[in-house]
Amino acid sequence: MTWRQVFLLSGFSALVFLSNAKQKIFMQESDASNFLKRRGKRSPKSQDEVNAEGRQKLRADELRREYHEEQRNEFENFVEEQNDEQEERSREAVEQWRQWHYDGLYPSYLYNRHHI
């Protein structure tokens, strides 16, 4: 091969390589503009960033509030059911005691007794 063929071959291969690498090297225009707009860690935030963070915090607070409200409602329902069951058991026990100790008088004889 002559030096011209080597030069043309290397130039052509470099051109093919760069055309394929162009897609990997260069970024989209919107990404590039955002990249140049990035601020340093100590620079003040823009109003858009402050507003976006505020919206995120409000949304997180709202989700947290809904979660705790749902948990509280579930617990209140559970406690109410437990109290109802306990009340029912207590009422049944009192009814059984009254039936067992009933002496035929109403109100029962023990409560009508006169003390001297």
Image (cartoon, helix red, strand yellow):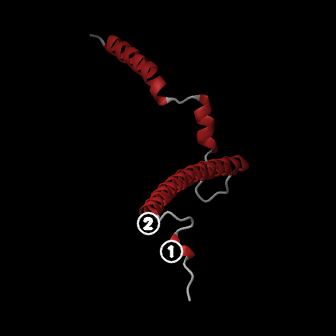
Which one is earlier in the sequence, the residue at label 2 or at label 1?
Answer: 2
Q: Is residue 44 left or right of residue 8?
A: right
Extreme residue in the right direction: 47
Query: Where, by quadrant of the figure, is residue 106 drawn?
Result: bottom right
Q: Nearer the viewer, residue 68 or 55?
A: 68
Question: Is residue 25 shown left or right of residue 6?
Answer: right
Q: Residue drawn 48% across and 23% down?
A: 23
SS class of the residue under badge 2?
helix
- Closest to the observer, 43 or 112: 112
Which residue sits at x=45%, y=27%?
A: 24
The percent position of residue 103, horizontal first and vertical second, equals 47, 65
- Circle 1: is it few (<14), some (14-19), or many (20+) Cα within 10 Å? few
The residue identified by callout 1 is 110
Q: Quadrant of residue 76?
A: bottom right
| Image vertical order of residue 102 relative to residue 88, above or below | below
Please tell me whether mark 1 sits on a helix, a strand or a loop: helix
Name the residue rendered at 67%, 57% in the picture: 44
- The quadrant of the image that shows the N terminus is top left
Pinpoint residue 52: horizontal percent, then vertical percent: 66, 46
Q: What mark, if any, has residue 26 been given in the picture?
A: none
**Badge 2 vs badge 1, beta-carbon distance below 8 Å:** yes
Q: Left or right: where does residue 2 sit relative to residue 31?
A: left
Residue 26 or residue 52, whichever sits in front: 52
Report the number of numbered marks. 2
Could you say which disc has been placed on residue 101 in the image? Answer: 2
- Report x, y in % for residue 77: 54, 51
